[in-house]
Image (cartoon, rainbow, N blue to C red):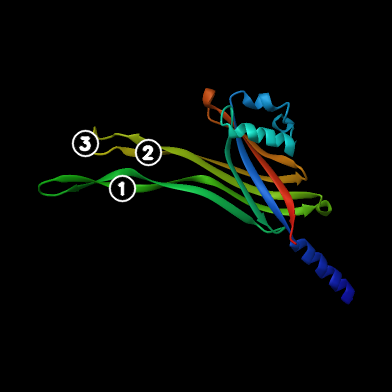
Amino acid sequence: MLRDIERFLTTILTARAQMITTEAVVIGFKKGARADWEKDVPALAPGGYYVESEKFDKLLEEAYKGQKVRLIDSAEITGFPQERVHTLRSQQESYVMDYEPQVSSFAALMDPIVGNFSSGFVMDVRPHFVHGGEQIAVDFRSGLLVGQLKEVDLFGGNTGALQAAQAKVLKWNSNVLCVKGKYSLAALETVGRGDDAEDYAVFVRARQNVLK
């Protein structure tokens, strides 16, 4: 009985000592660029899923150039199996969203109302080993908020210009199966219209880290 308990506890401790690092990379393909890469990266073609790390590295190298293929965002986090962890990269900007009139007996003023515009990328994951540790399944959730501030003059130059926030929120939730030495395609979505359209590909890789 004691030996059985010892083996059981050893199994639990061993599993807890094996941490998992999960990576997510979002790559954007401008019009026609994804089709050019389907031959080298079959995961981008219909029915595709896995891409070898060597081929992905070439795709990432091209994305760093920021031309027809560009890196949209990326994240990495490490946690224990079955532990839900998340990481957030965000940027906040203050902007003039409106004016409030202030009237007195001899003058009229417009006080600016300041707002906060946030953008960034969040990744929330819960990975665990399957098939004896040969594969890692990831409950993957992520969100990307992109946008810009645009100046708008509504008062004909009588006051300062307003700033309008234009933003788009993209969310990707998926159960991703990862294997050693490969990236998995978690999502593929077209953003924008016409010549400005881009295909966003979300790749996920999970790997085991053994504590020493």
Across and down, in percent, residue 206 comes to 71, 48
Image quarter hosting the C terminus? bottom right
Gap in Å between the C-alphas at discs 3 and 1?
A: 16 Å
Q: Quadrant of the N terminus?
A: bottom right
- Mark 1 nearby-residue class (10 Å; few <14, some 14–19, many ≥20): few
User: Looking at the image, which is closer to me, 15 or 130?
Assistant: 15
User: Residue at image x 50%, y 48%?
Assistant: 90
Q: Amino acid at mark 3?
A: Asn
Residue at left offset 21%, top offset 36%: 158
In the visual, does 150 lie left or right of 208? left
Q: Which residue in the structure is indicated by mark 2?
A: 164
Q: Residue at x 72, y 40 (%)?
A: 184
Can the viewer see residue 49? no
Q: At numbered mark 1, what does the secondary structure look like: helix, strand or loop? A: strand
Sequence order check, earlier mark of 3 and 1: 1
Q: Nearer the viewer, residue 104 or 52?
A: 52
Query: Eyeballing the image, is 130 above or below 15?
Result: above
Q: Quadrant of residue 57?
A: top right
Q: Label 1 sits on what residue type?
A: Ile
| Residue 113 - label | 1
From the image, tell me which residue sits under label 3: 158
Can residue 201 be seen here? The reply is: yes
Q: Is 194 left, or right, of 207 in this rendering?
A: left
Q: Position of residue 137 (x, y in %)?
A: 74, 49
Q: Position of residue 149 (x, y in %)?
A: 40, 38
